[in-house]
Amino acid sequence: MEDLFKIYKIDYAEAEKIQGTANEPHQHQFEELIIGIQGMIEHFIDFKSEVYESPFVCFVTRGKIHRVVPLVKDGECDFWVIRFRSEFIPETTFNLYGYYHDNANLQFPEERCFKRINQICEMMSEEMQQETPELSIVRELLTTLFTMIESERKKVSPENGNLYRNQDITFKNFLSILEENFRRPEGVNYYAEKLFMSARNLNSITQHVLNQSVSEIIETRKLIEAKNLLISTNKTVSEIGFDIGYADKAYFTSVFKKKSGQTPTEFRDEMQRLIS
């Protein structure tokens, strides 16, 4: 995608068209926000597939493998699809989605109408249809949209509020350093030293924000990359393990099975059957 920002609608006709075409799991180099006003969606992400009824929101970060199948419900299908490049807006609380797919989908109770969210989408769409769209306006509207979604999320899941309050600069810096180094065979002390703090203090921060230890977060990031490589390359299990910092194949297989419930080979075989 060359454009900084794009917004369009998926309706009944477009949903039927997508269902009739080959639609395999894929990845893209932009961020994607899907807002369901009417209808349903089958979303394959984080290597599992689930169905959500409208109203819902799905957020897919750049590079994550996923597949979307719009579904008609009661003769209706009405989705907003918003795509934008990472540099279009500054970091928001949604940057956590880049690492933890389980939070990529949110379904609201039916009584929560999307009236205001829908209005924001319509305003962005109208601006983009102008001969010379004012991207600064669209940027502000998109930021407002994220704020509204986050506000609704807190009403639906108030107990998970701490997960999305990632204002802590140290935690953001940890995620940034992790993204650059997770393929290396480094442990907690490496990241703590990079942040000029003790391993104990870094663990305290990650436990507060995500209720996970630093080691668990590192392994989660490695596992996501391993799954991406297993279904997108022909590399052997040993090669993939080595690529993400595991010199011993048996240990890599053990860690993979502990966190995913399958060996790397079992996972690859299952994904190949699913895709075919």
Image: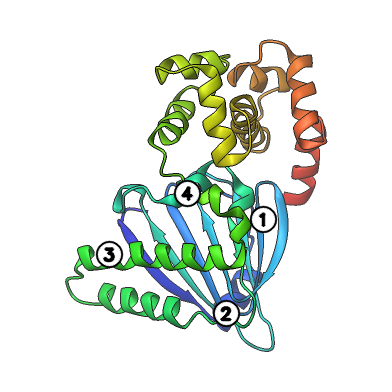
Q: Is residue 220 above or below residue 148?
A: above
| Relative image position of residue 144 (x, y in whole percent) | 35, 66
The reply to whether discs 3 and 2 touch (Cβ–Cβ < 8 Å) is no
The residue that label 4 is drawn on is 165
- Residue 61 percent across, percent down from the top left: 49, 49
User: Residue 140 — which label?
Assistant: 3
Q: Earlier in the sequence, mark 4 or mark 2?
A: 2
Kind of residue at badge 1 = Phe
Which mark is first along the chain, 3 or 4?
Answer: 3
Residue 167 coordinates in the image, percent (x, y): 41, 44
Residue sitting at x 48%, y 18%: 192
| Distance between the alpha carbons at the discs numbered 4 and 1 | 26 Å
Q: Tag count in the figure?
A: 4
Q: Is residue 184 visible?
A: no
Q: From mark 4 to mark 3, how far is it between C-alphas?
A: 20 Å
At horizontal 59% and vertical 44% (from top left) the residue drawn is 100
Kindly identify the residue that appears in the image at 72 percent across and 22 percent down.
237
Q: In the rendered view, would you say 23 is above or below 174? A: below
Q: Which residue is mark 2?
A: 112
**Quarter where residue 16 is shown:** bottom right
* Amino acid marked by disc 4: Arg
User: Mark 1 packing: few (<14 Cα in 10 Å), some, or many (20+)?
Assistant: some
Secondary structure under tag 1 reads strand
**Disc 1 target residue:** 44
Rounded to the nearest angstrom, the CA distance separating label 1 from label 2 is 25 Å
C-alpha span from label 3 to label 2 = 24 Å
Q: CA distance from mark 3 to mark 1?
A: 30 Å
Q: Nearer the viewer, mark 3 or mark 1?
A: 3
On residue 117, which mark appears? none
> Counting other residues with Cα less than 10 Å from the Cα at mark 3, is it few (<14), some (14-19), or many (20 or more)?
few
Q: Earlier in the sequence, mark 4 or mark 1?
A: 1
